[in-house]
Amino acid sequence: MKKTAPVAKNDFIDVVFEDLTHDGAGVAKVDGYPVFVPNGLPGEKAKIKVIKAGKGYGFGRLIELYDKSEYRVEVPEGEAHKYGGTQLKHISYEGQLQFKEKQVREVLSRIGKLEDFKIHPILGMEEPWQYRNKAQVPVGEKDGKLIAGFFKPRSHEIVDTNESLIQHPAVNEAVQTVKEICSQLGIQPYDEEAHKGVLRHIMARYGKTTGELMIVMVTRTTELPQKNKIVEQIVTRLPHIKSIVHNVNSKRTNVILGEKTKVLWGNEVIYDFIGDIKFAISALSFYQVNPDQTKVLYDKALEYAGLTGEESVIDAYCGIGTISLFLAQKAKNVFGVEVVPEAIEDARRNAQLNGINNTEFAAGEAEVVIPEWYKKGNKADVLVVDPPRKGCDEALLQTIIDMKPKKVVYVSCNPATLARDLRILEDGGYKTVEVQPVDMFPQTTHVEAVVKIALK
């Protein structure tokens, strides 16, 4: 007999939210059938409208709250509050931290089938707003005017706004200034559907410890009209400016930056520090958007590595060398691998910038390069992985199991793939010792974790 959902589209029903999904939606159950409702919090009673009813689950919209959670906070009006990529802004920061810590714990137990590991209280921020040091703002046109802001969720419709609540004020000011200058000078905004127009994105990068600012203007066209006037006005209005860059992206694509970059004014890079280590940041560099919490994360990784100065360390997915350079302060030598050649160039430059000479960096896929090193007899005492959201490649995990480094430190941005990979390492002779969740992106659903893993 065919099973049907106990609810139908357009039904109005009263529910109690039991949990949150990994992306922050409230979970209500009707006869065991889950309905996911944005903006609902555990323990709240509410009236919802069912907007979709599938075989296994449905989606709803919050209509009325009867009982509010102690963690609910009122969200001010305004487009920045509505569309700022801040899915958890209706939850107090204490509530957000509880949600994220619980998520890490439950996912490791449920997906990884892990037992007997220590999980520490999550490390949050004192000031969980205005922390991002980089904005990439899409530009478009509405009613004949140049607009720039956020994309509405699940669309390419731009909502014009002058600030983001999680961007550093200097970044908000920079984007708004460039937007005003380009509007006043009649720079034509990009039309995504027609693939016409000039200005596609405005990017601002800010060195929090140095106060240095970079502007990147991304255009469809190889020339930026009135570039001398634009540069003159930016320099006049933004005293912290150190670099103005023109990037060309002529393709029909969702990728923001193109391959051709030219410095219009000032330096090719700006500088920032994480702890005592100085980083050069170009228009194309990957650099952590929350350097304060990056230091918290990497200090914990360094602690878990337990280096004495005698160890050889491999840093898989090393990026621009951020963790590698932290580790190099305490290790005998560090070998870093990264698939993006430009990031490896940055890593080498950053090592030189800091006078660190016990690092080597190789461009290539970690799952290819590290097995090759292992075949040649290169082994690591400690291996550090900081993979993308998809987690580690199976070939890399197998090489770790074969190589048998005494310790593995796993820096994760996705609890689900972390749990999967930890299970593989546990089955291969390793033990998950302790886990430290870190809140790198307050007001959003993302959560990081650092894990200490030891050979059994």
Image (cartoon, rainbow, N blue to C red):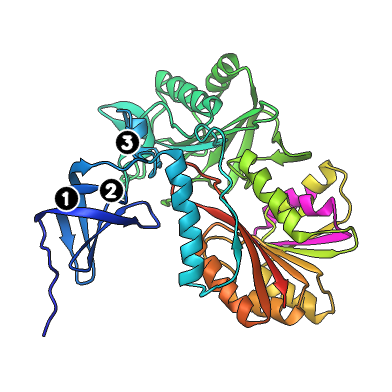
Residue 220 visible, this angle: no
Task: Report if the CB atoms under discs 3 and 1 are less than 8 Å apart.
Answer: no
Query: Residue type at mark 1?
Result: Ile
Bounds of the magenta segment: 326-349
Q: Of the residues tagged 2 and 3, which is closer to the observer? A: 2
Q: How many marks?
A: 3
Would you name the residue on which mark 1 appears? Answer: 48
Q: CA distance from mark 2 to mark 3?
A: 15 Å
Query: Residue type at mark 3?
Result: Lys
Determine the secondary structure under disc 1. Answer: strand
Q: Is residue 355 magenta?
A: no
Determine the secondary structure under disc 2. Answer: loop
Could you tell me which quadrant the N terminus lies in?
bottom left
Query: Residue type at mark 2?
Result: Gly
Specify few, some or many for label 1: CA neighbours under 10 Å numbering under 14, 14-19, or 20 or more.
many
Specify few, some or many for label 3: CA neighbours under 10 Å numbering under 14, 14-19, or 20 or more.
some
Please report whichever mark, 3 or 1, sits nearer to the chain's N-terminal start.
1
Residue 260 position in % (x across, y down): 59, 45
Q: Residue at x 53, y 42 (%)?
A: 248
Which residue is at the front of the view, 184 or 416? Answer: 416
Would you name the residue on which mark 3 appears? Answer: 82
Would you name the residue on which mark 2 appears? Answer: 40
Task: Report if the CB atoms under discs 1 and 2 are less than 8 Å apart.
Answer: yes
Could you tell me which quadrant the C terminus lies in?
bottom right
